[in-house]
Image: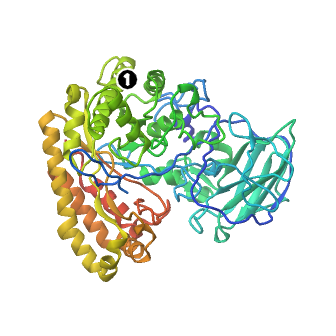
Amino acid sequence: MQSMRWYAGLALIVVCACGGDGEAGPASSGSGGTAGTGGTAGTGGTAGTGGTAGTGGTAGTGGTAGGGGEAGTGGVAGSGGTAGGGGSPWPPRHNETSPLGTNLSGIADWTGDWAFVDAFKMSRPWISGSSSQWDDGRDLDLDEHGWVLSLKPDQIARTLMFWGEKDHFPGGQYVVLYEGRGTIEYWNGATKNDGLSAAGRDVIDVDPTKGGIGINITAIDTSDPLRNIRLIMPGGVCSDDPYASCSSDADCAGTCESFEKNYATQIFHPTFLDRIKTYRLLRYMDWMDTNNSGLTNWADRPLVDDARWRSNGVPVEIMVELANRLGADPWFCMPHLATDDFVTQFATLVHQRLRPDLRAWVEYSNEVWNGMFDQSGHARDQGLALGLSADSFQAGLFYQSMRSVQMFQIWEQVYGGPGGFVRVMAAQSANPWTGEQVLSFQNAYEHTDAFAIAPYFGWNANPSDASTIASMSLDELVNRVSSEILPTVLQAMQANKAKADSFGVPLVAYEGGQHFVGVSGGENNDDINQKFDALNRDPRMGDLYAAYLDGWKSAGGQDFVHYVNCGAWSKWGRWGALEWIEQPRTDAPKYDALQTFIENNDRWW
């Protein structure tokens, strides 16, 4: 079939991601039965979590927190394996002149951004419970890839998918494929269809109006444990259009290729691909679970054949494959504890698999200046220990600069020089002094291709702001943003551009967009949350975005990477340009403004 041109040679893969935040209520009795042996062998999974940075900070000495497949030949190999051969053209690109990129939200069971046709990849980590307790705190007996090997007396292993996404994920018949023997029960929005199910293949009827999908494992045959569980979403992809999902041939000019038949090669849901296809750059900060990462050694990296990809992030093979599919440059945030060997192996894999017309962007961790993250404390400790400065904040910036250059030099050794990838040095937008520190230390600017900031505009609202915000009409809030908040951010853009120019380095944005969020207890105030939700849904937010992006262009900034493409809103922030992946563009003023800017502005540098 025509679409198989794009994915020829893909090794068999099963991707599995787990979410993490939030709590589920008590389990209801589900439909189930005894699972038999069977299923198709597979590998992998994907995950990651959110975590967003803010705009604040104290100038000078303080910082405050704010809120694969191989290119050309195709294929995502399992851990330690190699991708298949063959292949030919990639899918058509829609981003060649785009000036914008996007951060991707972390993989989770509640995010609203279903990236994978195998929805188990977005499932929550196993929860140990019993017939009388939702979470009993007992350890689960898991293999090295995260599959349940055995259960203690009256122990249930639970997981959740599409939790909190009521009515915002597809209904219909899902197919559950698995290997091994045991008892699987389905509950909440899912019911097993016994008439259509067989050993190794369950069919479940899903009603999103009843909530997300719950899965319980209540019994395990220890001689042949349940494993390699895949939850295949309904429908398929059009053979003539890799960005179009379908339920039958009538939806396509060609044929509708079933996800059950092609999930191992399709991997990414076409709706997900469609909503990000215009972005020229994909920043994987959340997919790599960058903030507070404990990942140190290459042997501990997430593997394609892991049950879940959440705890240490998404395997690099999958991130490269997504970049290859879309023709988008990947932006990697290297773990702050990573050894030189880790960096070498990571760079080698990217160099081998990334299609040759793309360039990897490489950054040391994320927001090392931001004291809310472990990487900031690590950098300060290391900087002080090395005697880089007597001031802890400056010592942390100097260590970030030094370690970034060391990491860049490793990539240069792999690539045979600095030209094949982009070396990113990041700093705090609201404090241009931080940029001067990281660029000037030991002449780091000579080893830097892009100086990155996060020029958010918004309001970090404390409880003391609640009465002010409650008393403001939406019109008054919009006027305040337009007349006071936005101009201040545009001035910061210009100041950072001047700083970048003084070092001869282009200015880019690693994150950006609106930043209206309650902090320090303000997140629990109903007046703040209701007003900020309304502002983000108001069409005038699109006008604010247009002025904001025009200001970035006028300031001379280059690649602008928005935070984030899609994510359910909460009291912790309204980061998603889309609240759910199928949200109409007409109902999503931020997403519409971003797409309109792309349509009206080719890259100007």
| Horizontal and vertical percent position of residue 169 | 59, 62
- Quickly name the residue at label 1: 411
How many tags in the picture?
1
Is residue 604 visible in this depiction of the protein?
A: no
Q: Is 161 placed left or right of 514 in the picture?
A: right
SS label for mark 1: helix
Residue 530 picture quarter: bottom left
Q: Residue at x 29, y 36 (%)?
A: 397
| Horizontal and vertical percent position of residue 296 | 50, 30
Query: 332 or 385: which is nearer to us?
Result: 385
Residue 284, relative to residue 419: is it above or below? below
Q: Is 117 placed left or right of 398 in the picture?
A: right
Q: Residue at x 58, y 60 (%)?
A: 22
Residue 432 picture quarter: top left
- What kind of residue is marked 1? Trp
| Horizontal and vertical percent position of residue 522 | 40, 68
